[in-house]
Amino acid sequence: MAVAKTSAFWLTETVTCSANDGDGSRFTGSIDLGAYVDVGDQQAISVEEVDVIWQRGNDFGNDAESFLALNGSLGVQLTDLNPSSAFVRADNNNLIASGALNIATGVTSHSNDFIPDVFGKNDAARIVVNDSMYVVAGNDGSAIGTSNLYVTVRIKVRIVKLTTKDWIAISLQSTSSDN
């Protein structure tokens, strides 16, 4: 399907969730893939792994209990079409990776969605033909704590060349609106 043109490398994007922002807030960021994706050459990005790092405050600490003012949850999604500032459902073709944390007094745990997302190489990887990826992070059940919360998405990728049939199939799937 895909033939690698490069070795693996990392792309990153950090979304800042503003201190004291209320329940249900969403924060966004984007990663420009214009230098990597080329329609004419059927060149795409192969996503092999996505890591999410949660940090807070000026010291970039990992004390999860201080991420939110009270008990609640934090979520993050990486997509290849812009969902504006919304989370998308798991069956959305544009969802690349997602993760969530539940935070309760004395307990912090992954919820129903685990991170990192590891896809693998070649046929197992998630192929992106769009010229951007989008990060949406947000909180539910409580306001952000008294310090900014930084959600960094690290994405392990390769530049790949696709056959014409594969390029068309992935483009159709990526832009489908049936979900």
Image (tube, rainbow, N blue to C red):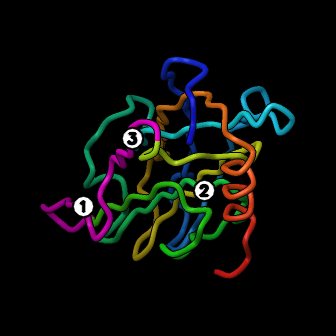
Q: Position of residue 129 (x, y in %)?
A: 71, 46
Does residue 56 appear in the picture of this structure? no
Is 72 placed left or right of 38 in the picture?
left
Which of the labelled discs sits on residue 51, or is there none? 3
For disc 3, the neighbor class at 10 Å (few under 14, some 14 to 19, many from 20) is some
Question: Can you tell which quarter of the image residue 34 is in?
Answer: top right
Which residue shows up at 35% across the image and 45% down it?
Answer: 118
- Sequence-wise, the earlier of marks 3 and 2 is 3
Which residue shows up at 43% across the image and 52% down it?
Answer: 146
C-alpha distance separating marks 3 and 2 = 14 Å
Frontmost residue, 173 versus 156: 173
Which of the labelled discs sits on residue 58, or is there none? none
Image quadrant occupied by the C terminus = bottom right
Residue linked to disc 2 = 79
SS label for mark 3: strand
SS label for mark 2: strand
Frontmost residue, 41 versus 151: 41
Frontmost residue, 79 versus 149: 79
Please, what is the three-letter code of the amino acid marked with disc 1? His
Residue span colored magenta = 103-122
Please, what is the three-letter code of the amino acid marked with disc 3? Asp
Residue linked to disc 1 = 110
Image quadrant occupied by the N terminus = top right
- Indicate yes or no whether the magenta region holds residue 119: yes
